[in-house]
Amino acid sequence: MSSAQHLDDVIDRLERAAEQLRSGELSSDAAATMVEDCAALATQAAAELEQLAQAEDSAPAPGQDTLL
């Protein structure tokens, strides 16, 4: 799975978690666990974004060749 696809997956999971938290149907313990899971997912998303940004920075600009 590419970084972009993994990032999309993480975003989808965060959106589903937000819907569940807003529904008010979770117990306090379940909500607390979900918030912890969301924090871990947000950390993953930040790492994926960093990786994508670094990949963009290392690629030559369109029309530019790398020097030997």
Image (cartoon, grey):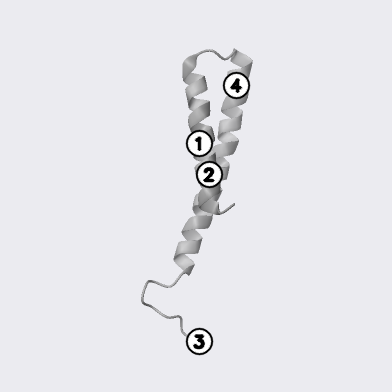
Percent of width and height locating residue 50: 51, 54
- Disc 4 designates what residue? 32
- Disc 1 designates what residue? 12
Residue type at numbered disc 1: Asp
Could you tell which of marks 4 and 1 lies nearer the N-terminus? 1
Residue type at numbered disc 4: Ala
Dot 1 falls on a residue whose secondary structure is helix
Label pair 3/1, CB-CB below 8 angstroms = no
Dot 2 falls on a residue whose secondary structure is helix
Q: Nearer the viewer, residue 39 or 66?
A: 66
Residues packed near mark 2 inside 10 Å, few (<14), some (14 to 19) or many (20 plus): many
Label pair 3/2, CB-CB below 8 angstroms = no
- Disc 2 designates what residue? 45
Q: Nearer the viewer, mark 1 or mark 2?
A: 1
Could you tell which of marks 3 and 1 lies nearer the N-terminus? 1
Q: CA distance from mark 2 to mark 4?
A: 20 Å
Q: Nearer the viewer, mark 3 or mark 1?
A: 1
Could you tell which of marks 1 and 2 lies nearer the N-terminus? 1
Dot 4 falls on a residue whose secondary structure is helix
Q: Left of 4 or right of it: where is 64?
A: left
Q: CA distance from mark 4 to mark 1?
A: 19 Å
Q: CA distance from mark 3 to mark 1?
A: 42 Å
